[in-house]
Image (spheres, rainbow, N blue to C red):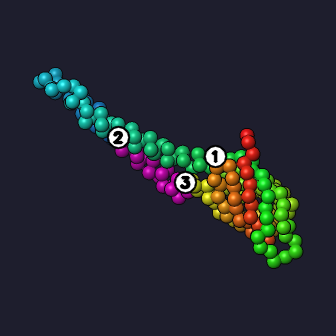
Amino acid sequence: MNAALSNCCEEHLAEFEAELLRHLRECVAQQQDAEAAADEEPAPSSVQTGMPIIRRCTRCLVIAGICSLAAAAPTMAADAFDGAYTGKRVLTKSSGPACPTDDDVSVTIHGGALTFTDSVLPDYSIGFDPRPDGSFSLISTGLRGAGVLIQGRIVGDVLDADVTNGPCEHHWHLTKNPS
């Protein structure tokens, strides 16, 4: 889930909670009215009388559950990709002699950050906010004046990405290490 959707859910969560409380109060009042009416005249059955009330209350609880999951989804999505990945980067395009043709790469994803190490940039960290399908696009102009563009996707235990660093363009193919 992207940040905009997360913010939207957070903004409307208070509204949903207020609506839920209103529905629950209605349910309680209707139940009390139904019980009072039952005392005055016999109803066909207490189950039949209570069913619309139960359905409405159940609907409120389902809405509350969905809102809770929506608010928690960004954290759950990011955490699903946490771990250490290792593999190779292979040169796909170069406009300079300083680009290694093939190199070992390691990536650690944890706490909203992707940290990678290769022969040129050791321990380079960049913010990491993947979409629920595992795709991501990261841009950083960080330490030592290095600019890095990383566009990729994680599917299962495999991270594939196209990485541009200065005049060098590489493809990463990394596998998640077992925990």
Segment tinted magenta in the rendering: 1-20
The answer to whether residue 113 is seen in the rendering is: no
**Element at label 2:** helix
Quarter in which the N terminus is drawn: bottom right
- The dot on residue 156 is none
In the rendered structure, the answer to whether residue 127 lies left or right of residue 40 reads right
Residue occupying the point 88% across, 74% down:
97
- Of the residues shown, which amino acid type is indicated by label 2? Arg
Q: Separation of disc 2 and disc 1 at Cα?
A: 30 Å
- Of the residues shown, which amino acid type is indicated by label 3? Met
Q: Which residue is mark 1?
A: 79
Q: Is residue 56 above or below residue 77?
A: above
Q: Is residue 13 above or below residue 25?
A: below
- Name the one closer to the observer, 36 or 96: 96
Residue occupying the point 72% across, 48% down:
176
Residue occupying the point 36% across, 44% down:
19
Q: Which residue is mark 2?
A: 59
Q: Residue 34: x, y in percent?
A: 20, 29
**Label 1: how many Cα within 10 Å (few below 14, some 14–19, many 20+):** some
Q: Which residue is mark 3?
A: 1
Q: Is residue 159 above or below residue 41?
A: below
The answer to which of marks 1 and 3 sits earlier in the sequence is 3
Q: Residue 56: x, y in percent?
A: 30, 39
